[in-house]
Image: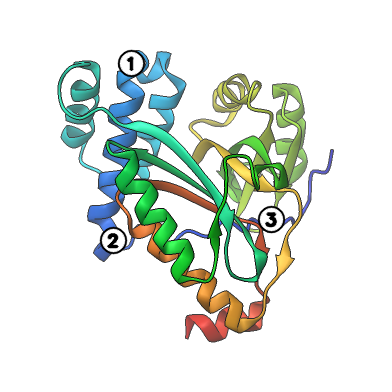
Amino acid sequence: MSGHSQFKNIMYRKGAQDKKRGKVFTKIIRELTTAARFGLPDPNANPRLRAAVLAARQANMPKDTVERAIKRGAGADAGEAYEEVRYEGYGPGGVAVIVEALTDNRNRTASEVRAAFTKSTGALGETNSVSFLFDRVGEITYPAETAGADDMLEAAIDAGASDVESDDERHTVITSPDDFNAARDALEQRFGEAASARLTWRPKTTAPVDEDTAATLFKLLETLEDSDDVQNVYANFEVADDVMARLSA
């Protein structure tokens, strides 16, 4: 178990910028509603809902908006019912992409996702066509100042985690899906609420992409995340720092 790994998290996310806040809120509200619909409406007794509430807090979502979404989901028959769907395919440069969605219309969402892949010279595949290239894991993060790397590693081992990655900004604790809830609870008892805690897909390996491929790939990922139906996007690529600097300029 490595406590100081510098493994680069290649999951591409745009972040909750002010101009994107509406879409971010829409995605979180769907997750809150769905988590409450399929579990207890109490975050302390519903790990999925607890993670959604934490995401809402990080996005500065008003408390009353969070409570309304939970109540709507807990009402079972009230409002729209969303279905979880996962899409898999290959983007430009043969990069493997996993798309997680919550939708009330599978045909609409599938059409949007397929069109995004096709436009970027990629191809949507069958379920499990690329997921074997990723590991399904729990991921719990704390700011670097929460504890020293050695202390965090020791606490993570005691909590049943499988790995810890520490750098100047954060500690990222990795768990199996089965151990995720128990590890999160144990770490929060010791260090307080985590900065984030969720189940995610982490690539087993990453492939470098050149500047032209990266530009096209980023357009694909942005198009996917612009969809209200799409919750998360994961891809197994990495971009050199100088290339990223030019693309971000």
* Pointer 2 residue: 20
The reply, left or right, for residue 66 in relation to residue 53 is: left
Q: Are marks 2 and 1 in contact (CB under 8 Å)?
A: no
Residue nearest the observer in this picture, 122 or 30 = 122
Q: CA distance from mark 2 to mark 1?
A: 28 Å
Residue at x 69% of width, y 28% of height: 176
Q: Nearer the viewer, residue 98 or 1?
A: 98
The residue at 36%/38% (across/down) is 102
Location of residue 122 in the rendering, given as x and y in whole percent from the top left corner: 55, 65
User: Looking at the image, which residue is at 65% across and 77% down?
Assistant: 241
Q: How many residues crowd mark 2 within 10 Å: few (<14), some (14–19), many (20+)?
A: few
According to the picture, the residue beneath numbered tag 1 turns out to be 42
Q: Position of residue 188 (x, y in %)?
A: 54, 27
**Is label 2 or label 3 in front?**
2
Residue 215 tag number: none
Examine the image and state in which quarter residue 243 appears. bottom right
Scheme by which the image is coloured: rainbow
Q: Amino acid at mark 3?
A: Asp
Label 1 vs 3, first from the N-terminus: 1
Residue, disc 3: 167
CA distance for labels 1 and 3 = 34 Å
Q: Amino acid at mark 1?
A: Asp
Q: How many residues crowd around disc 1 within 10 Å: few (fewer than 14), some, or many (20 or more)?
A: few
Along the polypeptide, which appears first: circle 2 or circle 3?
Answer: 2
Residue at figure coordinates x 38%, y 25% from the top left: 49
SS of the residue under disc 2: helix
- Left or right, 195 with reference to 145: left
Q: Secondary structure at mark 3?
A: loop
For the residues labelled 2 and 3, say whether their Cβ atoms are less than 8 Å apart: no
Say above or below: 131 vs 224: above
Q: Is residue 83 left or right of residue 123?
A: left
